[in-house]
Amino acid sequence: QVQLVESGGGLVQAGGSLRLSCAASGSILRIGGMGWYRQAPGKQRELVATVTSGGSTNYADSVKGRFTTSRDNAKKMVYLQMNSLKPEDTAVYYCNADDKWTHRDYWGQGTQVTVSS
């Protein structure tokens, strides 16, 4: 089992920045790719960014150039730096980890990000 705990969400004005953190624990040797997803009210959960164990990243078009994800394997952490935030970025943000052996998805409990206009 893998446990993920997000932190760093909050309320910010449009144009501002937030940094989300995700701490992994448990069977961390099983973790392959990690990433961030978000879900706005009334919408489906969507991919925001992913990062492989080697550090390669991928971003949704809507956040390219504004968000940066990174991971510190030694500290068992993954981060999402969000700059130039927009009201449409308002959502619950979830940390995700992929089990590299079973491809089961693990999820954190989510952290609320609210961007005011």
Image: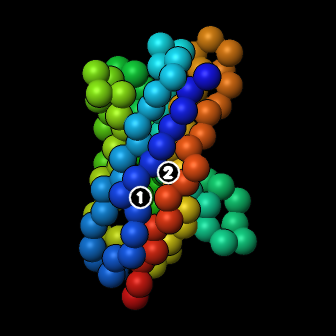
Which one is earlier in the sequence, the residue at label 2 or at label 1? 2
Quarter of the picture holding the C terminus: bottom left
- Between 78 and 15, the residue placed more toward the observer is 78
**Image quarter (top left, top right, bottom left or bottom right) of the N terminus:** top right
Q: Is 18 displayed left or right of 43 in the figure?
A: left
Q: Is residue 89 among what the camera can see?
A: no
| SS for dot 1 | loop
Q: How is the image coloured?
A: rainbow
Is disc 2 placed on a helix, strand or loop? strand
Amino acid identity at mark 1: Val
Q: Which residue is mark 2?
A: 48
Q: Can see residue 4? A: yes
**Does 117 appear above or below 99?**
below
Compared to residue 86, the image places residue 91 above or below, namely: above
Which residue is under mark 1?
63
Residue at the image point whose x is 31% and y is 48% from the top? 68
Judge whether 18 appears above or below 97 on screen. Answer: below
C-alpha separation, residue under disc 2 versus residue under disc 1: 7 Å
x and y, in percent, of residue 104 in the image: 68, 25
Q: Position of residue 96 (x, y in %)?
A: 54, 38
- Residue type of the residue flagged with mark 2: Val
Q: In the displayed image of the protein, which residue is found farthest to the bottom? A: 117
